[in-house]
Amino acid sequence: MKNKIQKITPNLWFDTQAEEAAKFYTSIFKNSKIGRITRYGKEGHEIHGMPEGIVMTVEFQLEGQEFVALNGGPHFKFTEAISFIVNCEDQEELDYYWEKLSEGGDEKAQVCGWLKDKYGVSWQIIPTALNEMLSDPDPEKSERVMKALIQTKNKIDIKTLLQAYEG
């Protein structure tokens, strides 16, 4: 019997750090694991230019979400146009993910709960209550929350958002 394949799987293009990045991410998220690893062979060297035996892809899961990390060379870089949202129940969880994922990352890219990790991947570390506050039918409440959010220099402080929400 075949394993069920996830319909959509994010593919992350790294220069040569696919395995290192997969190990980094799976060390942070609790329900995570590394799966199949493939390696470059002799075939196709004239196209990909990678040495035989180097890791080509690493399949891994973070909280049940499947990913593939590819060592594709230095041709493409990550941008903030794609980011991964980490929904956090409380400040302790938010602080944990912020600390772990921002370690060694680009400090200039830390604003309004967004960060860029040491591999250049963008993450949004947000409280689960944020969407509820921003979509509140009372426009004054949601506007105050948005104002507080855009004034955030790096990680989000849930207490500050709640104070803005409550007026």
Image (tube, rainbow, N blue to C red):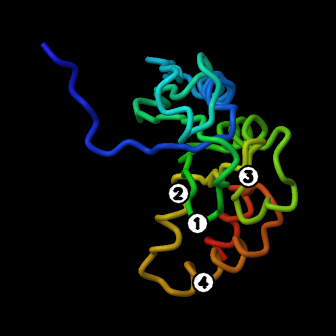
Distance between mark 2 and mark 3 Cα atoms: 22 Å
Q: Nearer the viewer, mark 2 or mark 1?
A: 1
Q: Position of residue 26 (x, y in %)?
A: 59, 24
Q: Amino acid at mark 2?
A: Ala
Q: Position of residue 165 (x, y in %)?
A: 62, 71
Task: Pick whichever of labels 2 and 3 is earlier in the sequence.
Answer: 3
Secondary element under disc 2, as helix, strand or loop, is: helix
Q: Where's residue 104, x and y in %? A: 85, 40
Label 4 amino acid? Glu
Which tag, 2 or 4, sits closer to the chain's start?
2
Disc assigned to residue 143: 4
The amino acid marked with disc number 1 is Ala
Asked if the residues shown at circle 2 and circle 4 are in contact, with their CB atoms under 8 angstroms apart, the answer is no
Looking at the image, is 144 positioned above or below residue 36? below
Which dot marks residue 81? 1
List x then y, in percent, for residue 134: 52, 73
Please report whichever mark, 2 or 1, sits nearer to the chain's N-terminal start: 1
